[in-house]
Image: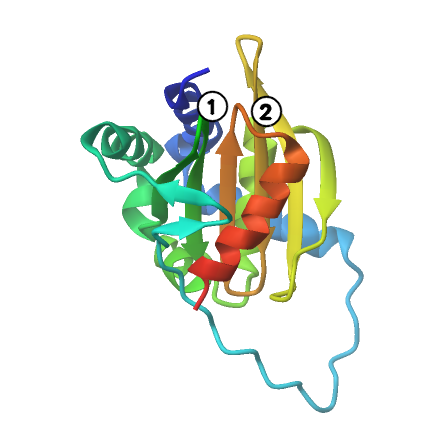
């Protein structure tokens, strides 16, 4: 399967932008609020962790970022098709390869997602991943160790016209990253997610 198949699946998930990214994120937030019981406010608030930023590393977990025109065309097609999400949130995006294995990386920060109009009080990064997982119709979802940076790592499988793509994502209070590959097994992709995150988060 080519990386362009991955792009089509991602764009299918991001088609939610066509009827309003902000509205979709708000709906997930409101649903979470309805399902989570409200707790009394604490008398002393814990200090918030410093917000983290993201960079596109040249390599991570044995994979190298592809910088040729063909790789850039794949990334550009994906970002263009994502429409309002890519335009407002300006995600980090890159194609990585090792031998015959490839994955596409999409990275977001809460600061960038705030540009879409999502309330600052919302856990925008987790909300975004939940919305994209739902949009892709992921099956067989699993959780994996997140590594020293904490947060969560989840994986699942998306499909389009009978072709399967493994998807893994990390989320923490200020960043989120998704890795998508048709060739890499879930356990290996989860490990690559942790490895790339270690190089990308600042």
Please state if 51 lies on the left or on the right of 68 as rendered: right
Q: Residue at x 51, y 49 (%)?
A: 61
> Which label sits on residue 88?
none
Q: Earlier in the sequence, mark 1 or mark 2?
A: 1
Work out whether 64 lies above or below 47. above
Q: Residue at x 41, y 35 (%)?
A: 97
Q: Quadrant of residue 100?
A: top left
Q: Nearer the viewer, residue 95 or 153?
A: 95
Mark 1 to mark 2: distance in Å?
A: 7 Å
Element carrying mark 2 = strand
Q: Position of residue 114 (x, y in %)?
A: 40, 60
Q: Nearer the viewer, residue 133 or 147?
A: 147
Work out whether 124 lies above or below 22. below
How many numbered marks, from 0 up? 2
Q: Are circles 1 and 2 on residues that touch, CB within 8 Å?
A: yes
Residue 68 can be seen in this image: yes
- Quadrant for the C terminus in the image: bottom left
- Residue tagged 2: 158
Q: Position of residue 65 (x, y in %)?
A: 35, 43
Element carrying mark 1 = helix
Residue 26 can be seen in this image: no
Q: Nearer the viewer, residue 135 or 178?
A: 178
Q: Nearer the viewer, residue 24 or 109?
A: 109
Q: Quadrant of residue 111?
A: bottom left
- Residue tagged 1: 9
Q: Quadrant of residue 49?
A: bottom right
Count neighbours of disc 2 (C-alpha within 10 A) and say few if under 14, some if 14 to 19, many if 20 or more: many
Please state if 17 lies on the left or on the right of 180 as rendered: left
Count neighbours of disc 1 (C-alpha within 10 A) and say few if under 14, some if 14 to 19, many if 20 or more: many
Please state if 188 lies on the left or on the right of 93 as rendered: right
């Amino acid at each position: 399967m080519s990386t362009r198949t991955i792009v089509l699946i991602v764009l299918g998930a991001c088609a939610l932008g066509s009827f309003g990214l902000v509205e979709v994120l708000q709906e997930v937030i409101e649903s979470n609020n309805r399902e989570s019981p409200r707790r009394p406010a604490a008398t002393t608030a814990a200090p918030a962790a410093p917000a983290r930023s993201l960079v596109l590393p040249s390599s991570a977990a044995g994979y190298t970022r592809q910088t040729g025109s063909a790789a850039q065309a794949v990334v550009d097609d994906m970002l263009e098709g994502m429409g309002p999400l890519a335009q407002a949130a300006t995600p980090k995006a890159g194609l990585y390869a090792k031998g015959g294995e490839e994955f596409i990386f999409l990275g977001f920060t809460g600061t960038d997602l705030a540009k879409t109009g999502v309330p600052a009080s919302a856990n925008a990064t987790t909300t975004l991943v939940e919305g994209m997982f739902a949009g892709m119709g992921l099956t067989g979802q699993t959780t994996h160790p997140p590594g020293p940076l904490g947060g969560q790592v989840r994986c699942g499988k998306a499909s389009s016209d009978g072709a399967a793509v493994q998807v893994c994502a990390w989320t923490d209070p200020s960043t989120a990253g998704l890795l998508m590959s048709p060739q890499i097994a879930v356990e290996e992709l989860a490990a690559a997610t942790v490895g790339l995150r270690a190089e990308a988060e600042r």
